[in-house]
Image (tube, rainbow, N blue to C red):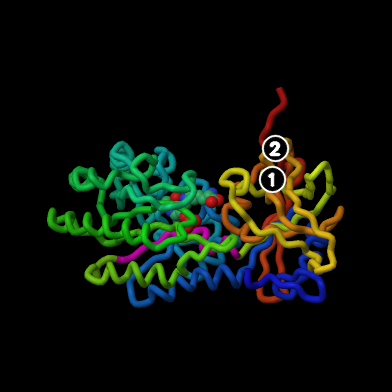
Amino acid sequence: MEFLHYHNGQLLAGKVAISDLAKQYGTPLYVYCADYITQQFCAYQDSLKDKQHLICYAVKANSNLSVLNLLAKLGAGFDIVSQGELERVLKAGGDPKKIVFSGVAKSIVEIKRALEVGIKCFNVESEPELYRINEVAKQLGKIATVSLRINPDVDAKTHPYISTGLRENKFGISYQLALDFYQKAACLSHIKIVGIDCHIGSQLTELSPFLDAADRILTLVDKLKAENIHLEHIDLGGGLGVCYDNETPPCASLLVSELMVKLANYAELEVIFEPGRSIVANAGLLITKVEYTKHQDDNHFAIVDAGMNDLIRPALYQAWMRVLPVKEPKSSDNKEYYNVVGPICESSDVLAYQRELFVAQDDLLVICSAGAYGFSMASNYNGHPRPAEVMLEGDNQHKLIRKRETFDDLWRGELVL
Ligand code: LLP
């Protein structure tokens, strides 16, 4: 994370001391760097400048209104998977005409709302969904623009929980059935076919699965053309991985340039990407305080105030996320191998295993690369209010972008019998 560095023995984000952020806003605390988000988004934009394109940020990665608003101002479109995400994008000033709607379980209410606000297109994931969209559009007297999400049966070579492009996954329409499916869609009265899309998984660190998926999708585009079904766009999904430890994923510009070679003969197609993680993961960190240290037998625990409720990635996907002490480590420190664990009553509540640290009660630690799928997956499990979120702007400005939840927030909407 380029904006994090030690200065005079203290960890800083830009020119801001992490300890000052903790003092001002409390812990656990999510902090994001606006400049980094901008830089990552612009890397996609710039590498596509010679091609008609739309970068639809995947809202699920980090859906804070300030993040969405920042991206909307940069010209982003949005990939959404629920009405909740749709309403967030609208609230944040996003343009409905730049929204693509993915997800396998779109309800009638969600489809209706999306048609009313005039989204760019539905990424249709099954045959019954297509018929439902046609019906709802008919009732509203509208034409629904759709793209079919194709499952290309490509191994994304990532964690099985975040792999979505294999035949056995619930996502998309099998590419073998796709032609037939497009023909059916073309006959529906309130459907206009505009695109094709795929998304094969997340945290992809190799290029080959993207290229293999693109090949399969383009073969379909050719077959559709032969059947007189002409598309306006091709959406190649998100999924580009980031460096948490020592991974070396391709950068956005390399991914895009390699894919553009394949698209050279498809000048008429607008290109869409749906990146989430690669825009925000390394823009964010989670600051947490050591409540206690505990040393038993050979086990050393740093028991911190953030848990799997705040950041579930290590517990759910065995994700490795870097832990940095806020006080710069010295070579003379008597370090131990610690498990960094949270307050939750589950043995899986471990943020990091076996990290060589020198820590004491009340010290601060930073969990790096927490900008994607951190806060957006947080919960109130075990009665913990969700953390505050802060945005860094430039080197030394910071603003609260979400208040820490209060205890009243914990039972908002509940009724006592
Ligand atoms: N488009 C669709 C249809 C998706 O399902 C996803 C992510 C994306 C785009 C964005 O993918 P990205 O660029 O962020 O990889 N919670 C997991 C990741 C789940 C990803 C789900 N879909 C994690 O923390 O690793």
Task: Specify start and end residues of the magenta stretch as a single range.
Answer: 270-282
Residue 131 in sight: yes
Identify which residue is drawn at 69% across, 45% down. 350
Numbered mark located on residue 350 in the image: 1
Look at the image and say whether residue 275 sits in the magenta stretch. yes
Label 2 environment density (alpha carbons within 10 Å; few <14, some 14–19, many ≥20): few
Query: In which quadrant of the rendered view does residue 329 lie?
Result: bottom right
Identify which residue is drawn at 30% across, 48% down. 142
Residues at marks 2 and 1, CA–CA distance in whole angstroms: 7 Å
Residue 78 in sight: no
- Left or right: 163 as drawn, with respect to 153: right
Identify which residue is drawn at 26% across, 47% down. 175
Q: Give the quadrant of the N terminus.
A: bottom right
Q: Give the quadrant of the C terminus.
A: top right
Residue 210 in the image: state x and y as whole percent: 37, 59
Instruction: Indicate if the residue with disc 1 has its beta carbon within 8 Å of ligand 1.
Output: no
Residue 58 in the image: state x and y as whole percent: 48, 56
Label 1 environment density (alpha carbons within 10 Å; few <14, some 14–19, many ≥20): many
User: Of the residues shown, which amino acid type is indicated by label 2?
Assistant: Ser
**What residue sits right under mark 2 in the picture?**
347
Q: For mark 1, give the secondary structure.
A: strand
Residue 332 in the image: state x and y as whole percent: 84, 67
- Left or right: 293 as drawn, with respect to 79: right
Q: For mark 2, give the secondary structure.
A: loop
